[in-house]
Amino acid sequence: METIKTFQEMKNFDFARELNKEQMKVVTEGNGSSLVLAGPGSGKTRTIIYRAIYLIKQQKVSPASICLLSFTNKAAKEMIKRIEDYLGFFPKNLIAGTFHHVGNLFLRKYANKINLSPNYLIFDNEDSISLIKNILKDKIYQNIDISPEIIKTIISLSISCNEPIKDIMEKNFVWLSRWIPTVVSINSIYQQRKKELGVVDYDDLLFLWLKLFSFPEIGAAMSNRFSHVLVDEYQDTSRLQALILYEIARTHNNIMVVGDDAQSIYRFRGATIQNILEFPKIFPETKIFYLQTNYRSTPEILQIANYEIRHNRYQFPKELKSVKNAGVKPVIIRCKNMKSESAFITQRIKELIDSGIKPSEIGVLFRSRYQASELEINLNRMNVPYIIRGGVRFFEQTHIKDVIAFFKIIYNFKDEISWQRILRLANGIGKIYQEKIIGHIKSFSNLEDIIILSDYSQISDKAKKSFGDIISIIKKVKQQKTLSSGIDLILDVFYKHYVLNNFKDAEERLNDIGSLKEISMFYSGIEDFLSQISLQEYFKEEIHSSHENVVLSTIHQAKGLEWKVVFIIGVCANHFPHRESVNDILRIEEERRIFYVGITRAKEDLYITYYTSDFFSRGVSFRKSLFIQEIENSLIEEWIFD
């Protein structure tokens, strides 16, 4: 039988030896409301964990009175593992987990107070979307032109941001504004159906938890349950999560939030930098601590990071200091276009690997997914193993395969897989009709001979019209003189509308297709173009089995990670910062924070690339980003690769 350890049997910690002076100050003086501004690579998770251990060992605080809250499951598991590693066991009754996890604990306990069964089921995102799909089957919604996934995203953002659906759609989904009353109606039915089914979704775990605080006795009991609340990654919290924290700390004000306003980059998920900026106003006696000692990057890399983030107006100023010896200056490389940029990066990566650097120690980061499209082709061609973090390779993405399917049919009109792909996009053509239409297509020998289904009684009128429209589009694409004009036509007359109404990241997907258009300009015709795409599939199977891979990632996906060598690519005007942000100071500042996060992923070497022409330039040259222009020349080297 396993012996349960007592706190007297725990490791004897020499806190002063384990922590630097900044961390030690947080750990020992963090009573009351405390804001810990922790720069990248400063050991923030270590500090918050040691704060919990200090409370238990030195302050004799009961573990049951401590709540450790994190933003993600990954972060929660890391906190729990570290406590177990440091102590040799996990203290009984210490609460540690995500907001959703802790919300679920309280909701189970007090569910009856809000007419909810304590045995409620929790819907995951897939379940929620399925329920919305069922609602959309009602005849009153038969003409709605928005996907259930987007409707669910809008509902979730409304709850997270604590804003009406109307405001969320007008700010984030302006092209869908005409559907505002419809989405409001669907949400009303969705909320009612959940009640009838006795289920809650992930949003409810927080929304209903906050609702419990409106009952004075329950609110006081939940607040008194913890004498110390410790929150990690506070810059990533939503307005709803901040309101919950204000209520938890209401009776004691013993709340420590740890985060970095300079790394607040998830506004599109509902996170708001205002939570961390306004914390001292909500808790007027807040102590502010700074963790500015960086254990990751060289002084030269941190100089650029510090210099860049100083341009932000809305922030807590801080200055990262490196513990490492001096290294080399970061390099900014000017390239001619995306193709020459990818050639430089591939060449440099090959040189680094040949010099003994492991592929896994190299990270290639970008603002948006489409910026790495040409690079993938080059890495494949040069047999450089790579992986895409948090996603699929460029040519494997749904929207890219949809557009390419049109060209595959032109090249081989009996390509059944491509017909299935395109037909599923059309209104009124379900799986049964798809089979009948494809059977119809097989009876002809070429595209020009295909007869529209005007007299085909087995197919609905809606499906007949959709099929006729598809045939018309394909024939017009075939008549185009260039591949790029064909892509434009597919977008303009059909696919852009589909993307906007079916994908929550529609803008990014349209940029991907813009990148596909640029790639197509380097090929002489359909056969050459499709052969190159087919080779991407071959390369994927042949050379990417190695466990040692260069990592390609958006900067959002790279947060919390680090590499010995980092490339930040496509740092061009209209790309980074994103062209939609140029007239909005708050959005520009978030873009600058994204750039800052990218810079601070590098440990020893940093390369920043830009190019001088692309499919957005329309003849205008010199496309260096505002962010590159802000960097002092003495802090960098400059190379030209044309």
Image (spheres, rainbow, N blue to C red):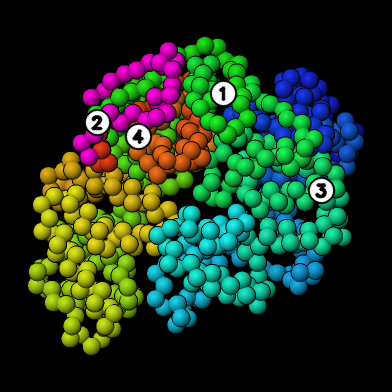
Write down the residue under mark 3.
Answer: 250
Question: Local crowd at mark 2 within 10 Å, few (<14), some, or many (≥20)?
Answer: few
Dot 1 or dot 2: first in sequence order is 1
Residue at image position (60%, 54%) is 161
Dot 3 or dot 4: first in sequence order is 3
CA distance for labels 4 and 1: 29 Å
Dot 4 or dot 2: first in sequence order is 4
Write down the residue under mark 4.
Answer: 573
Judge whether residue 442 is colored magenta: no
Residue 546 in view (yes/no): no
What residue type is disc 4 on?
Ala
Write down the residue under mark 1.
Answer: 296
Residue at image position (52%, 57%) is 168
Question: Local crowd at mark 4 within 10 Å, few (<14), some, or many (≥20)?
Answer: many
CA distance for labels 1 and 3: 37 Å
Residue 404 shown left or right of residue 74 in the figure: left
Q: Judging from the image, what secondary structure is the residue with disc 4 in?
A: loop
Q: Residue 343 location, x and y as percent?
A: 27, 30
Residue 141 shown left or right of residue 610 in the figure: right
Dot 1 or dot 3: first in sequence order is 3
